[in-house]
Amino acid sequence: MNYICNCKKTNLNDKPYTYWEDRDITTDELDIINFLDKKKDITSKSILHIGIGNSYFAKKFSFNNNITGITISQKEIAKAESLNLLNYQLLLLDKYSIEFKNFLNKNKFDLIVDTNLKSYSCCLKTFEFMIHNIFKSIKPKGMLITSVNGMKWFKDLKPKLSFSFRKFFFYKLKEISGNKHNILMPDELKNLSKKYNIKMSIDDKLCYLKK
């Protein structure tokens, strides 16, 4: 994939990395699902899910919505495809890449879900590039939802050759501590949302950005 910055990148497309496909859903994503369940109007929506994990989100909402899920893990894609869900499109994409921008130029969404907007960005330039592209892709009256807890993360991913008696040798993505500058402060996100005429509201668990 291609990027607008010159930061050193690890090629995550060269091997079938395992990541979150066989792990439990995170509490951050579950908070978003519970919120959407209570709204009871999530139907016939075009939804972008950034970071599909074990595809629990798609299992909950794909039956009456059109969901596009993106991930950097080939194993997450394989797991998602094995579910044979209707209305579920899958793409191997990095949200910080130019390829993701090109995809968003051709697609708009009623709802975008991403539990950690900034956690894994390599630099501020790339993060703001990503936010610009995502905000532009929200349909009128659409919304981006993220996790307040996820805003506090500063993670990085390290490719690793691992072993287990079930999988033998396999490649996985290991989460390690990242750059503390990737903590997304509410004021930073508020200023960015103002720039793009997005209304931001926040509670103890979730942050909502509405067009």
Image: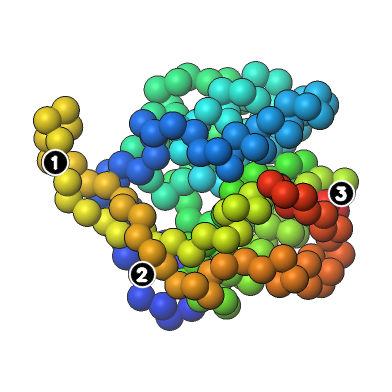
Work out whether 88 lies above or below 109: above
- Residue drawn at 39 percent across, 33 percent down: 23
Tag 2–tag 1 contact (CB < 8 Å): no
Q: Is residue 33 left or right of residue 175?
A: right
The residue beneath circle 2 is 9
Work out whether 115 lies above or below 154: above
| Rendered image: mark on residue 75 | none
Q: Please, what secondary structure does the residue beneath circle 2 have?
A: loop
Q: Please, what secondary structure does the residue beneath circle 3 have?
A: strand
Q: Amino acid at mark 1?
A: Phe
| Rendered image: mark on residue 140 | 3
Q: Classify 10 Å Cα crowding around label 3: few (below 14), some (14-19), many (20 and above).
A: few
Q: Amino acid at mark 3?
A: Pro
The residue beneath circle 1 is 163
Work out whether 211 lies above or below 43: below
Q: Amino acid at mark 2?
A: Lys
The residue sitting at the front extreme is: 204
